[in-house]
Image (tube, coloured by chain):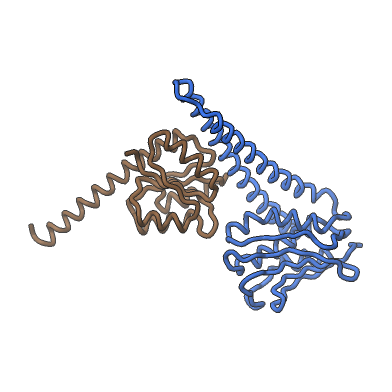
Amino acid sequence: MGDKVLLVDDETDFLSVMSERLQTRGFDVETSDSAKNAVDQIEETDYDAVVLDLQMPGMDGIEVLKQIREKRPELQVILLTGHGSVEKGVEAIKLGAMDFLEKPADLEMISEKIKKAKQKRMLIMDKMTEKRIVDIVNRYGM
Amino acid sequence: MIDSTGRIGLAFFGALSASISHEIKNRMAIIHEQASLLEDYIHMAAKGSETDPERMLKIAGSIKKQVGNADVIIKNMNRLAHSTDDLKRTASVEEIIDLIAALSKRMADLHEVKIAAPQAKEPCSAHTSPFLLMNLIWWCIKTIMPFVQKNDTIRLSHEKSGDGVLIRMTVEGKPISEEEIEFPEETSILAGLLNGEVGYSREKQQCVISIPAALP
């Protein structure tokens, strides 16, 4: 099975065409057209990466990013935005987003970033597992 | 040094330009992806995959739809830009309201609020500054928007009243208390420039702008 990605954008036409293109490249894609639903989906499903629109009704991408970092710190987020300025991108990176791309973005670049996101997530998860094992060993003096 | 009127006008024009350019970029992103999807299909066909003409036509139709959407956004931007052509002129109040409602839609969408500007029973015109009037309506919408509940509606309407025109922004849904809303100084400055008044009626859940039918 391909890398599992959640695409989050309030533009349903964008979601439908982007998911079709990613699927033809072997990605396992799920979509969400609302920030709130995306947060719920992230809690229920293990994704390798999230591609997130920065500006959405109800809850903006920065707020979604904060919630993802809280609920799934290992999950890598790639922000996509229609903003021309980089200020929001800098803020997002400071908050822990893996990368920030301006729309329209090249699909090959997005694909590459998703693959890197998966690798980064696996490394973080390995470190988390290692830390848990060390904690157990230290706690029980094994 | 920019005076307060210039500052208010720039803030309005800047906010709307940012919103419009964001909308256009969104449309362009979709068109870009749809055109790229067509390319994907063509490459697949070149490698021997069977093509589905119906699917191709559907994608082409979607591209046309997005171009149409972008065209509406650009037309509205053009109308906004031309609202500064004359300091004052005789203009249809209905057209001004329609335009500012359309230009405020993105702000409303982000707040999950609806904006409605139904056709007036009795359309009227005013000899006024279309740019300043749009600016004032926008500031009023912006001021009340954070207090409007999700999925509620701000309905814009207008009517003749004596020698002037009343423009109403009615909140349809959970009432907003008068105390909650504090109109910024921009609204009183703009109302003053238009020889008009602006206020909020809790009883009617309305923000009301009154302007004279003709500026001297």
Residue furthest to the left in view is A142
| Relative to A39, B198 lies left or right | right
For the point 35% across and 50% down, which residue is it? A75
Looking at the picture, tell me which residue is in the foreground, B103 or B194.
B103
Q: Please, is residue B164 above or below residue A118 in the view?
A: below
The image quadrant where one finds the N terminus of chain A is top left
For the point 39% across and 40% down, which residue is it? A114
Looking at the picture, tell me which residue is in the foreground, A75 or B124.
B124
Measuring from the top left, give residue B70's x and y in whole percent: 66, 42
Q: Please, is residue A69 above or below residue B191 in the view?
A: above
| Relative to A41, B177 lies left or right | right
Measuring from the top left, give residue B187's x and y in whole percent: 73, 66
Q: Please, is residue B206 above or below residue B120 in the view?
A: below
| Relative to B139, B159 lies left or right | right
For the point 42% across and 34% down, which residue is it? A24
Q: Which chain is blue?
A: B
For the point 68% across and 46% down, which residue is it? B73
The image quadrant where one finds the C terminus of chain A is bottom left
Q: Which chain is brown?
A: A
Residue A18 visible? The answer is yes
Measuring from the top left, give residue B194's x and y in whole percent: 83, 63
| Relative to B202, A57 lies left or right | left
